[in-house]
Image (spheres, rainbow, N blue to C red):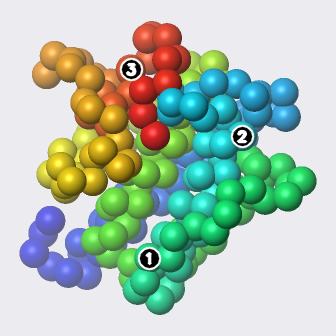
Amino acid sequence: MSGDPKADTAADLALLARATGYALEGLAEVTRADLGRPTPCPGWDLRALLVHLADAAGSLTALARTGDLVPPGPPGHGGADPAAVARNRLLVLLDAASSAGYGTAARAAAVEVAAHGWDVGRACGSARPMPPRLAADLLAVATSSLPDALRPVSFAAPVDLPATAPAEDRLVAFLGRRPAGSPVSGTAS
């Protein structure tokens, strides 16, 4: 945070754009055959995760446009390709956040979007790493702004890792996921 609200908003929006880009890369790898695969989120296959990501992006778009966080409606998007729905909603979120000068809330959205981008990659068996600088920036946001009261609702307990682990591993471990190289066991949401 620079102390300059305009510069901070620009940095927050840039972080959201980078996180969205990372998630979109993962969504591009999804095939219909992948939709039944397990994810790092307990009880969710890839289809359920994609529906959640699309719904979260829709809720965050409403927040950017109206200032009110609107919970997602009933799960599901008919027969639509859930990866395409998630992709479209992420692009709408990014546009709405930029148009509204979304600011501080963009940081929280960036963590959510990137974490689920990571989940998608793991479910698809991708070895595509999160860019190190993005992971470090998101780790700083997550560790400084995730209230303990939100953890049981949104994230599993942190996974212990040494401080010398790469930022990507520390980020996903902080969010209750097992870092790459660990089996997908369903540990987070």
Would you name the residue on which mark 2 appears? 47
Report which residue position mark 3 lands on.
179
Q: Is residue 52 above or below residue 161?
A: below
Q: How crowded is mark 1: few (under 14 residues within 10 Å), some or many (20 or more)?
A: some
Mark 2 falls on what kind of element?
Answer: helix
Q: Residue 39 location, x and y as percent? A: 58, 28
Q: Marks 1 and 3, how far apart in space?
A: 30 Å
Asked if residue 95 can be seen in this view, the reply is yes
Say left or right for 83 vs 55: right
Report the Cα–Cα distance between label 1 and label 2. Answer: 24 Å
Tell me the quarter of the picture where residue 168 sits: top left
Q: Earlier in the sequence, mark 1 or mark 2?
A: 2
**Residue at the limit of the structure toward the right, as seen here:** 79
Q: In this view, does 11 lie to the left or right of 77?
A: left
Amino acid carrying label 1: it is: Leu
Q: Which mark is residue 69?
A: 1
